[in-house]
Amino acid sequence: MSGEIHGGAPAAGYPGVGRVLVVIPTYNEAANVADIVARVRRAAPAVELLVADDNSPDGTGVIADALAGTDPAVHVLHREGKQGLGAAYLAGFAWARQRGYDAVVEMDADGSHAPEDLPALLAAARDADVVIGSRWTRGARVVNWPLRRLLLSRCGNLYARLALGMPVSDATGGYRVYRTAALEALDLASVCSQGYSFQVELSRLAHRAGVRIVEVPITFAEREHGDSKMSPLIVVEALWRITGWAVQDRRAAWRRAGRARARWP
Ligand SMILES: Nc1nc2c(ncn2[C@@H]2O[C@H](COP(=O)(O)OP(=O)(O)OP(=O)(O)O)[C@@H](O)[C@H]2O)c(=O)[nH]1
Ligand SMILES: [Mg+2]
C-alpha cells in the first residue's frame, strides 16, 4: 500500500504564503495522531495536512485514514515500513511539490511542536524561504525536557554551528516551514541523513544555497504519550555526518585558497 493516497479537496491557502501542507511523519503515534491533527485544524484552518506513516504496527495509519475520511484537508501517505524521519519527510516534500503546494511544514506528531505556534511561523514565511521554529532563541521555551536532552540539544547545536559556520541557533530543530520554490534550490537528491541530522543537513543546504532563513521562537514540550524514537544511533549519525560535512567544507576552502594563491604573481 506504499504511496496510497487518501483525502480530497484543497483548502483555500494561507494569506501571503499560499497553499500550505503540514507534513507529519508518524511511527507508532496512535495515541497522538488524532489530537495533533485536530490542533492543527483549529490553529490554522487554511492549511492541509499529510500524515506520512511508515506502516506503524500500532495502527496509526488506520486512525489517519479515518481522519482523512471525514476531513478533505487531511491526507495520508502510507509507506511500506520504517525508513527513518528523513525519508518520510523527503516523500512528503515530493508529494507536496507534485501537487503544487506553495509551502510545506515539518511537524512532529507527539505534540512537542505546538500547532498553536504555527500562525507565527507562517507569518514569518511571508518574508522568508525557510522558517525554523527555534528552541534556542530569545522568547523560546522548553517545557519538561530532562537535563540530558537539554544538554544534548544545546551541545549538538553549538557543535553544528561552529563546525558548519551556520548562523542558526536550532539547526537540529524539526519544526519548520519551507517554501516549495526554495526546496527546488536545494539538492534534495543528495540528502543522505535518516535521523536528527536530516534537519542539520537541510539547514546546511539552505545556508549554502543562500536562501532566506529566519528563526522564530517556539514553545517546545516533551511528549506526553507514546515512545520516543530517538536512539544513540541517531546521535552518532548526527555527530558523524556533521564532522564529515565540516571536513568537506574545510577541504573545499583550502582548495579555493590554494587556487587563489597560485594566481598571485
Ligand atoms: N514516518 C516515520 N516517522 C518517524 C520515524 N521515526 C520517527 N518518526 C516520527 O518523527 C517524529 C519525531 O520522532 P520522535 O520519536 O518524537 O523523536 P524526537 O522528537 O526526535 O525525540 P523525542 O524528543 O524523544 O520525542 C514523530 O512524529 C515520530 O512518529 C520513521 O522512521 N518514519
Ligand atoms: Mg519527539
Image (cartoon, grey):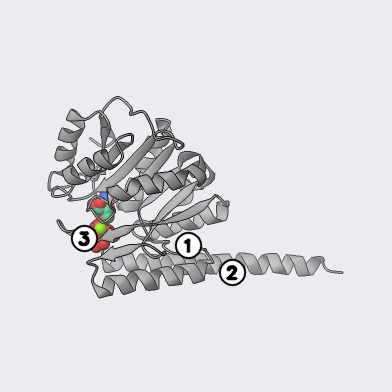
- Residue 10: give x, y in percent of width and height: 33, 27
* Image quarter where ligand 1 lies: bottom left
For label 2, the residue is: 250
Residue neighbourhood size for the residue with mark 3, other residues' Cα within 10 Å, grouped as few (<14), some (14–19), many (≥20): few
Q: CA distance from mark 1 to mark 3?
A: 25 Å
Residue 188 shows in the view: yes
Please state which amino acid type lies under the numbered disc 1.
Val
Nearer-N-terminus badge (1/3): 1
What kind of element bears circle 2?
Answer: helix
Please state which amino acid type lies under the numbered disc 3.
Ser
For label 1, the residue is: 168
Say whether mark 3 is within 8 Å of ligand 1.
yes
- Residue 182: give x, y in percent of width and height: 51, 43
Q: Are marks 2 and 1 in contact (CB under 8 Å)?
A: no
Residue 78 shows in the view: no
Is 46 rendered above or below residue 60? above
Please state which amino acid type lies under the numbered disc 2.
Arg
In-image side of 213 versus 115 (left or right): right
- The quarter of the rendered structure image containing the N terminus is top left
Is 103 rendered above or below residue 176? above
Q: CA distance from mark 2 to mark 3?
A: 35 Å
Nearer-N-terminus badge (2/3): 3
- From the image, state whether disc 2 or disc 3 is nearer to you: 3
For label 3, the residue is: 228
87 and 126: which one is in front?
126
Is 260 rendered above or below residue 115? below
In-image side of 109 versus 87 (left or right): left
